[in-house]
Amino acid sequence: MDENKTLDELADAAGELVEPKVKDAVIEAEEMAADIAAAHEKADEAAEAAERAAVEKALSEEAVAEEVSSEEIANTAEAAEEIAEAHIAEVAEGSAAAEEISANAAEIEADILAAGSATEEEEIAEKKAVEEALDAEVEKAEVIADTEKKGSSVKEPPIIKKKKKLDKTNVIVIVVCAVIVLACLAFVGYKSGWFTPKQKAKIEVEDYSKIEVLNSAVEVTDDTVQQYITNILQTQSETTQVTEGVVMDGDQLNIDYVGKLASTGEEFSGGSAQGQSLTIGSGMMIDGFESGLIGAEIGKTKTIQVTFPADYQSTELAGQAATFDVTINYKSETVVPELTDEFVKNYSSNYLEKQLNTVEELEEYVHDYIYHYYLHTAMFEDLQTKGKSISYDEEAEAMLTQYSKDSIDYYAAMYQTTADEYAVMYGYANADEYAKEEAHYYLDTIMLVDKIIKDKKIKWTDEDLDQSLALYMARNGYSDQYTLEEFKTQSGETWMYLYENLEFKFDLAMEALEPNVVFVDQKTEPETSSEAVSATEAESASN
């Protein structure tokens, strides 16, 4: 902590020292660049004027050759020489300004070195080296300027071309300014944490060559198989609307009703509805309402007389007698298909990964499916004791925490409570703690599965994942509602991430580890640290 504080203080001091000088150097460099640019612009304009004059002179030479005197030619040459000398003088002034900025840059470099941890001798040596390098570049620039000046006395009007490259003096200024700017950016980046690496997932896993599974954990009874097949039949059931007959207990009705106070015959607020679903015997309505409909004819209207409870939530209705005119629109009947070989053929061809032809084959398929579900669940419970998460991937943790928060908010709204109250129902202090704990459970599982897949070098393709997802859709009744791509979009990126890792890859990993399973009647309890100490002490005493 102290070292980090010292580093921050040194960085702040360096920043305060560099900032004003950086600004001065940048201002001077900009002024220098503006002056040089102006000089070039003036020289270019003069050169273009001289060139135009030369061209005009050449065009009119034949017509007025006898009128052109040697004195005019001399005057033209002298004018061109004056233009060149003016340009060279401006360049020399730019060189002097560059030398001054170079000196300022050397001073800034020395200040930066003084803010670091170098010794006094190293600072002097580095400062001298920088100054010598800058002086050498300035001398080169001056030599170049002198050379241009000496060779500029020409007899004919010169055509001065625009320079396409920066001269060495400008390059030096730009490089020094760039170094200073980069140093400032590095300082700001350090303070802002730009270079702090993101946390990645890390897990430690013990030897899992032996996975203990209780025999009782994988027992599959006939009742379990039949219950699973009953669920399959119910997913294939069809609901029809019946508009004749009479109402019986347990019927699912669709009704319209209008409530009126018996004392006045007037309708009361909240006492009417249309298209209301009601299951007779559910207790959803006040006493006497549902029972009063039993035996009523479907498609007709019946008037029911009821009395609101004395403790009814509406004080205006509490204890009041009322009537309800109820129209029974229809009742819904669910037709469950019969389990036959024909049903098995149709169901397996549409929803399973293999073709089945008989009821016996379906029963064997279901038994095997449930067995492996139990087996993989028990295997993973044992594997969880062998894995320890050290850190989580930051991006995955944030994504799954938000996913869990959204799920908690959804169920809290369904139960008409707050997210924190919903979390307390499950033993958590608040919704944030619940969401984070759930996200970590997901990540613990994903990291352990990834470790196994990497160790076993398990490979798969996108087509394999799509086939697994299509089977999931079929088993859960989504195939009739969505195409595969529609289901992916509807489910969302996070759900797909969880399915790939907690369903698809999980099954691949568990299947690869099935040969490692050892079935036992009672699991071996892991030796605690205190038991290990006691055993050591006992062994020492016996010796």
Image (tube, rainbow, N blue to C red):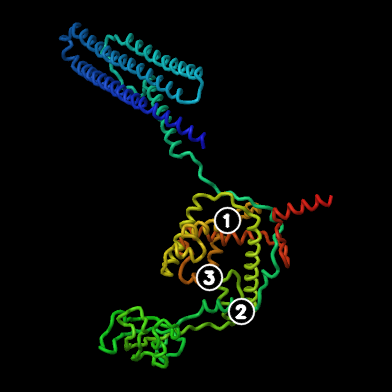
Which callout, 1 or 3, points at the residue further toward the start of the chain?
A: 1
Vertical placement of residue 160 versus 209, above or below: above
Which callout, 3 or 2, points at the residue further toward the start of the chain?
A: 2
Q: Single out the mark in the foreground, 3 or 2.
A: 2
Please state which amino acid type lies under the numbered disc 3: Ala
Please state which amino acid type lies under the numbered disc 2: Gln
Image quarter for residue 278? Answer: bottom left
Image quarter for residue 84? Answer: top left
Q: Exactly how many numbered labels are in the figure?
A: 3
Q: Residues within 10 Å of mark 2 (few under 14, many from 20)?
A: some
Label placed on residue 94: none
Q: Residues within 10 Å of mark 3 (few under 14, many from 20)?
A: some
Residue that numbered label 1 is attached to: 444
Residue that numbered label 2 is attached to: 226
Closer to the camera, 393 or 68? 393
C-beta proximity under 8 Å, tags 3 and 2: no
Which callout, 2 or 1, points at the residue further toward the start of the chain?
A: 2
Residue that numbered label 3 is attached to: 474
Spot occupied by residue 104 in the image (x, y as percentages of width and height): 37, 20
Please state which amino acid type lies under the numbered disc 1: Asp
Closer to the camera, 179 or 432? 432
Secondary structure under tag 2 reads helix
